[in-house]
């Protein structure tokens, strides 16, 4: 009897099978022997150079080394409105740092990944440094000074058309106290006629001023060559996430969805400003929290209002800092307000978590405000709008009162254990063999692609590579992904499945 043909794009109608039972009945020797046989069969196929690294597991070692590596850090400092953010955009090759023709747009340290001549480094944009500043301007200056403390080298940007001001001299004194290598940037040198303005900055005592136009790109290549001479191979001040340390949890959601209230409940104090006005939080706020007998590091983030490229000013920076907080997190708790209709914003935030490869927990907040009428609509919205993340563990809670906050620990554990999980090559190939035998890939144009061999190349999140004889339909890949989740309990984590199509040796292309 032929297998049931799938109806729809994720092969949910394939019918029942006993794949899990057959897999459980196999011994370790049997699954290892099957994997070894399939691996040997790859010798008949044309493999590419990097295939051997994937098949030997060298990728795991490379990833481990990569996780331990901390790129050198370069801080960009200077007084307000000398063009620091414009220079940052020029170096990273994209318009990410906010630039406006007014001083003080940048307030916080914002980090970007950068590369020059094959060398990776972290570029830190800072707010304008001012002497004797007060209020928020003092906080901005403090942030800039802290950026210098944790940097391996400093780009000191001066407006060459204005020359060295009293504030520039104050920055010089601060940098001399820090004792870090300093590369002096004479910015706004747009042509030969202003070269003399740059030469005048020798008087600051930091050696050669590098004349550049961050707006037009003039001279930035020579500047970056000089930067590489000063940067170490690896940062002496980096702070990678330590193994075994507190797991990092990012709280994400729309503005006013209850993120700050939840953090206050978890921390047991008014750690974060909570206000009915949406958007009170602009900077990610870290807090060590005791939950379930363990210490966690929770990060409250700004509510994401709109698409990042459409945001302006403070909203833009909030979205950048939220993305940075997510990159540093291991698991994201996305809060969804049950008293409001699930929106495009909610979908965008969920997709951001998936794209970042982070574990995911859904927290349905304001459950105490849910009435029966709204509950019926909510169930329908969950079925329709959250189907693509039905694999994420979820909890119902009230951030305001703390109701069910204790349920969060179990959901976080489920998601993080799946995020960390690795399946042995033997088990994976035994699973794939049984699954394909029960549900073969549909014929396409008279051909049926086969899975030759599979291996998991990384965790956090789990990533798999399948060697095949042809491209697998997207629906069939989603089917494999879904069955991987069910069989190996990958709840709470995105799964990445990549294909490597290989042909038999001697076959004409």
Image (spheres, rainbow, N blue to C red):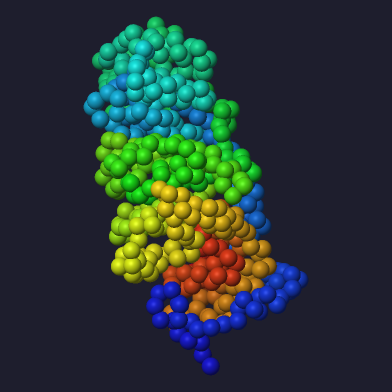
| 360 and 97: which is toward the camera | 360
Which quadrant of the structure image shows residue 489? bottom right
Give the farthest residue toward the top: 203
Q: Residue at x 60, y 78 (%)?
A: 19
Residue 99 falls left or right of residue 183: left
**Residue 271's spot in the image, x, y percent?**
45, 36
Residue 478, how many percent across, how many down?
Answer: 47, 69
Tag count: 0
Q: Is residue 307 above or below residue 230?
A: below
Q: Residue at x 34, y 23 (%)?
A: 136
Of residues 3 and 298, the one nearer the viewer is: 298
The picture places residue 142, in percent across and down from the top left corner, at 42, 21
Can residue 186 be seen in this snapshot? Answer: no
- Residue found farthest to the left: 101
Kindly identify the residue that appears in the image at 30 percent across and 28 percent down.
Answer: 105
Front residue of 304/103: it is: 304
* Farthest bottom residue in view: 1
Question: What percent of the width, then of the height, locates residue 16?
Answer: 53, 83
Quadrant of the rendered structure where residue 278 is? Answer: top left
| 40 w.r.t. 346: above or below | below
In this rendering, the answer to whether 64 lies above or below 79 is: below
Q: Can residue 136 be seen by looking at this rendering?
A: yes
> On the image, which quarter does residue 196 sit in?
top left
**Residue that appears at 47% across and 23% down:** 146
The relative height of residue 315 versus residue 384 in the rendered view (above or below) is: above
């Amino acid at each position: 009897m032929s297998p049931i043909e799938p109806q729809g794009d994720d092969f949910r109608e394939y019918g029942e099978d006993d794949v899990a039972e057959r897999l459980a009945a196999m011994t370790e020797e049997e699954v290892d022997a099957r994997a070894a046989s399939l691996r040997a069969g790859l010798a008949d196929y044309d493999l590419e150079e990097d295939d051997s690294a994937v098949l030997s597991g060298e990728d795991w070692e490379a990833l481990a080394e990569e996780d331990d590596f901390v790129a050198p850090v370069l801080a960009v400092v200077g007084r307000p409105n000398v063009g620091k953010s414009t220079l940052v955009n020029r170096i990273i090759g994209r318009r990410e740092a906010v630039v406006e023709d007014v001083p003080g747009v940048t307030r916080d340290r914002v980090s970007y990944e950068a590369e020059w001549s094959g060398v990776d480094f972290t570029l830190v944009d800072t707010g304008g440094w001012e002497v004797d500043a007060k209020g928020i301007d003092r906080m901005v200056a403090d942030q800039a000074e802290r950026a210098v403390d944790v940097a391996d080298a400093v780009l000191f940007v001066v407006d060459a058309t204005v020359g060295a001001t009293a504030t520039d001299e104050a920055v010089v004194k601060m940098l001399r106290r820090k004792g870090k290598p300093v590369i002096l940037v004479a910015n706004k040198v747009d042509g030969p006629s202003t070269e003399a303005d740059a030469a005048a900055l020798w008087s600051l005592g930091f050696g050669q001023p590098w004349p550049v136009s961050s707006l037009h790109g003039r001279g930035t290549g020579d500047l970056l060559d000089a930067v590489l001479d000063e940067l170490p191979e690896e940062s002496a001040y980096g702070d990678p996430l330590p193994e075994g340390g507190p797991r990092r949890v990012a709280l994400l959601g729309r503005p006013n969805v209850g993120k700050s209230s939840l953090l206050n409940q978890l921390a047991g104090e008014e750690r974060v400003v909570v206000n009915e006005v949406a958007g009170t939080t602009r900077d990610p706020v870290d807090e060590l929290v005791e939950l379930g007998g363990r210490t966690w590091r929770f990060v409250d983030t700004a509510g994401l209002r709109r698409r990042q490229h459409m945001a302006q000013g403070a909203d833009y920076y909030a979205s950048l800092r939220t993305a940075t907080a997510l990159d540093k997190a291991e698991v994201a708790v996305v809060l969804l307000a049950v008293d409001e209709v699930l929106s495009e914003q909610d979908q965008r935030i969920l997709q951001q978590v998936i794209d970042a490869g982070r574990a995911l927990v859904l927290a349905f907040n304001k459950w105490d405000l849910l009435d029966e009428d709204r509950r019926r609509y909510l169930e329908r919205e969950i079925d329709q709008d959250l189907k693509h993340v039905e694999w994420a563990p979820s909890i119902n809670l009230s951030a305001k009162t703390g109701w069910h906050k204790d349920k969060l620990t179990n959901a976080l554990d489920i998601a993080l254990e799946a995020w960390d999980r690795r399946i042995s090559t033997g088990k994976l190939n035994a699973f794939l063999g049984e699954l394909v035998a029960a549900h073969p890939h549909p014929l396409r144009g008279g051909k049926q692609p086969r899975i030759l061999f599979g291996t998991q190349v990384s965790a956090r999140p789990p990533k798999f590579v399948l060697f095949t004889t042809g491209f697998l339909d997207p629906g069939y890949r989603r089917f494999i992904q879904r069955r991987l989740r069910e069989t190996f309990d990958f709840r709470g984590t995105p799964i990445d499945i990549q294909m490597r199509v290989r042909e038999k040796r001697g076959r004409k292309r």
